Amino acid sequence: MKMIEIHDHLNKIWGEIFKLNEVLREKLKPLGFKVEPVEEVFNAYIFLEGEWREMLYPHPAFEIKPQGEIGATIQSFYFVFAIPKEKLTRDFVVEFLKKFPQSYIYGTENFLEDIYNHNSPRDLDKVYGEIEKSQEEVFQFEVEAKDSEELENKLFGFIELAKKYKVIET
């Protein structure tokens, strides 16, 4: 492990998140979202080598109110939106997974159990079936990207999809 590579990577993700925060503050306001400042997030988990692992170190993230968060870990950039179960439909879930195959779906209570898992994805109908039979009241829909530019593009695609199915409140 080379320390300069770790240093450069951490600077990259923090720098890109600060820039993305500024850009999205202006772009999302007309769509009804409020973008909060970047914060250090602790007590998070990252999916590495097939399992969720606790991160004792902070990573950069910021809230998109209502219902969302954008951030970056050592692995990827991400956004995640909390959606109440009663708003979810099979059509939304299937279209979400087709549009965002690099994603996770998990509950807010049992957040270490990914219902979809893009490393070995379940059949799309089975994913919705797992949501239906779950005791969870809110589900997290998380999408990964390799950099902040790709994340921004995916975010606007998600917002369009979420508004189509009326699963987020703006």
Image (cartoon, rainbow, N blue to C red):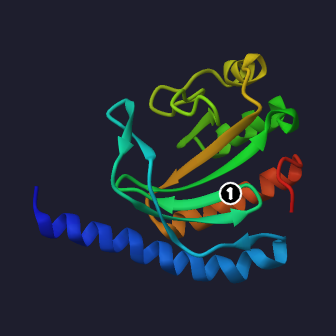
Is 82 or 120 nearer to us in this picture?
Answer: 82
Q: Which residue is mark 1?
A: 68
Left or right relative to 40: residue 164: right
Give the mark count: 1
Tell me where residue 128 appears, x and y as whole percent.
Answer: 74, 24
Tell me where residue 43 appears, x and y as whole percent.
Answer: 44, 48
Left or right relative to 142: residue 72: left
Callout 1 amino acid: Gly
Tell me where residue 101 appears, x and y as whole percent.
Answer: 57, 40
- Quadrant of the rendering where the N terminus is positioned: bottom left
Is 108 or 5 nearer to us in this picture?
Answer: 108
Left or right relative to 154: residue 92: right
At 48% from the left edge and 72% from the top edge, which residue is drawn? 17
At 82% from the left edge and 35% from the top edge, which residue is drawn? 88
Picture quadrant where residue 100 is located: top right
SS label for mark 1: strand
Picture quadrant where residue 89 is located: top right
Tell me where residue 134 appears, x and y as whole percent.
Answer: 72, 20
Q: As displayed, is residue 69 above or below residue 133?
A: below
- Quadrant of the rendering where the C terminus is positioned: bottom right
Q: As displayed, is residue 54 above or below residue 66?
A: above
Picture quadrant where residue 93 is located: top right
At 68% from the left edge and 57% from the top edge, which residue is drawn? 68
Residue reaching furthest to the left: 2
At 21% from the left edge and 64% from the top edge, which residue is drawn? 6
Q: As displayed, is residue 110 above or below residue 134?
A: below
How many neighbours does mark 1 have within 10 angstroms: few (below 14), some (14-19), or many (20 or more)?
A: many
Left or right relative to 113: residue 43: left
